Amino acid sequence: MAKFEQESVADALERGLRNAKHLRMKHAPTVAAARALARKIDAWDVIVEWAVEDAAETRGARPAVPANDNVSIASFLKYLDALGLTPEDEAPAASAPGRPATRPPATQPTKLPNKVLAFRQKAKAE
């Protein structure tokens, strides 16, 4: 089992990029966006600290930024997925180099659960 060092998100991203042999120059914009977001994620705690300190100086004021960021990590994981840096597949998908499939293929429901959906399906088919 690999031993993971404590490191910043930006440093971990750089390590992943160095080890990704499938990436090409066409991935440069996605890499740049992932790097910028990694720096933001790493700086978030410091930014929140500053905002809380500023708010404390002005009694009763709210911090300028929210205490938590619930979108950056999810967005960052999408960048990793787009770059083929997520561990779902060991090798990039054959259909799109550098971008493994993240969703199972869509399947048609075998039985419509109710009359409303059956009506909608019938109307869509016409």
Image (spheres, helix red, strand yellow):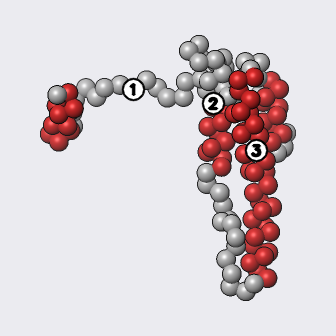
Q: Earlier in the sequence, mark 2 or mark 1?
A: 2
Q: Which of marks 2 and 3 is nearer the N terminus?
A: 3
> Does residue 2 appear in the picture of this structure?
no
Residue nearest the observer in this picture, 44 or 33: 33
The label number, if any, that marks residue 82 in the structure image: 2
- Give the residue number, with chain letter if any, for mark 1: 106
- Residue drawn at point x = 59 percent, y = 18 percent: 96
Placement of 70 over or under 37, stated as above or below: below
Q: Residues within 10 Å of mark 1 (few under 14, many from 20)?
A: few
Task: Measure how far apart labels 2 and 1 are at the Cα level.
Answer: 20 Å
| Residue 40, position as x, y percentages in the image | 75, 51
Residue 11: x and y in percent read 84, 39
Which residue has dot 3 on it? 36
Going by the numbered disc 1, the residue's amino acid type is: Ala
Residue at x 77%, y 59% (from the top left corner) = 45
The single residue placed furthest to the top in the displayed view is 94
Q: For the residue labelled by badge 1, is the local secondary structure a helix, a strand or a loop? A: loop
